[in-house]
Image (spheres, rainbow, N blue to C red):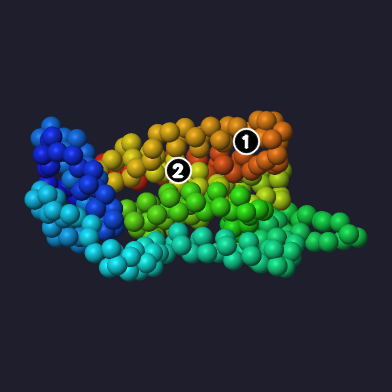
Amino acid sequence: MHPVMHLPSDADTQELRKALWHYRIGHRITEEAEGPLLWIADPRQHAELKSLVARWERGEALIVDQPANRRYASGSILTTLRHVPVTATAMAISLVIFALTGWLGNGVVMALTIVPIEISGNQFVYRSLTDGLINGQVWRLLSPAFLHFGWMHLIFNLMWLWYFGRQVEVLQGSRTMLLLLLVAGIGANLAQYFTGTVLFGGMSGVVYALLGHVWVMSRRAPQRGFFVPQMLVVFMLGWMVFTMTDMASWVGFGNVANEAHLGGLLVGLITGVYYSSRRLKTD
């Protein structure tokens, strides 16, 4: 985030903020001693932001020409996806694998579980992770993160992957997002595996890592522009605790990869502290 200007202390900034988000200008307004301070995420949009602020100060309408706006909005989806290639690719892979699982069945699942699975006498035979790695099946360390076992499971994970992953990728870059995806995905899968579970899947370990990372960054380096509502943090942590209890199975959620959630969260908290500490040293 980069500081731009102070706004009048008694001004209602609701219309200005609505217009800034409408034109996809990432920003934040913080309360400072000199008055509200307007920050911008992308300095390349500085001139556009200044123009909107000037029109706002003159009392002009900020959102006009609805047909043009609709054309802009339709194109902005592709623009947004181009800015977050890692997040978009992870979502696309999850969707493709979910579709292939429904089409081809257990063969897809068996190819992506953390350990090799064979069928012998109409029964599943589970090999060890070491067997898979020795045979060069290193993808199994990460691939369970892309497996989902129902629409609700898929939608829930991809919704939060988009919410948190987009922040990380826009504010810290695609390389950092890719590193987080790999470390959190592998870390969460191994945490679940070492509890004795071999048949599991889902992006939720990565989601909890991103939650922890974004939350720590928003607390320790707020000038970077990260934001997560406190009630969302409470909900996500409460949900994790809820799924660790017997009540989750009583209401029909079945088995949940709790260790993957916890392992991912720990990874995210550690990376958040690491990156925020680097940022604080450079400030």
Vertical comparison of 72 with 186: above or below: below
- Residue 142, percent from left and from top: 58, 57
Per the image, the residue denoted by label 2 is: 211
How many other residues sit within 10 Å of disc 1, few (<14), some (14-19) or many (≥20)?
some
Compared across the picture, whether 259 is left or right of 254 comes to: left
Is any part of residue 184 visible from this angle? no
Q: What's the CA distance linking mark 1 and mark 2?
A: 17 Å
Residue at (45% x, 36% y) in the render: 233
SS at badge 1: helix
Is any part of residue 262 visible from this angle? yes
N-term-proximal mark, 1 vs 2: 2
* Closer to us: 87 or 37: 37
Per the image, the residue denoted by label 1 is: 243
Q: Quadrant of residue 146?
A: bottom right
- Residue 8, percent from left and from top: 10, 39
Compared across the picture, whether 234 is left or right of 275 comes to: right
SS at badge 2: helix
Q: Are marks 1 and 2 in contact (CB under 8 Å)?
A: no
Residue kind at label 1, given as amino acid type: Thr
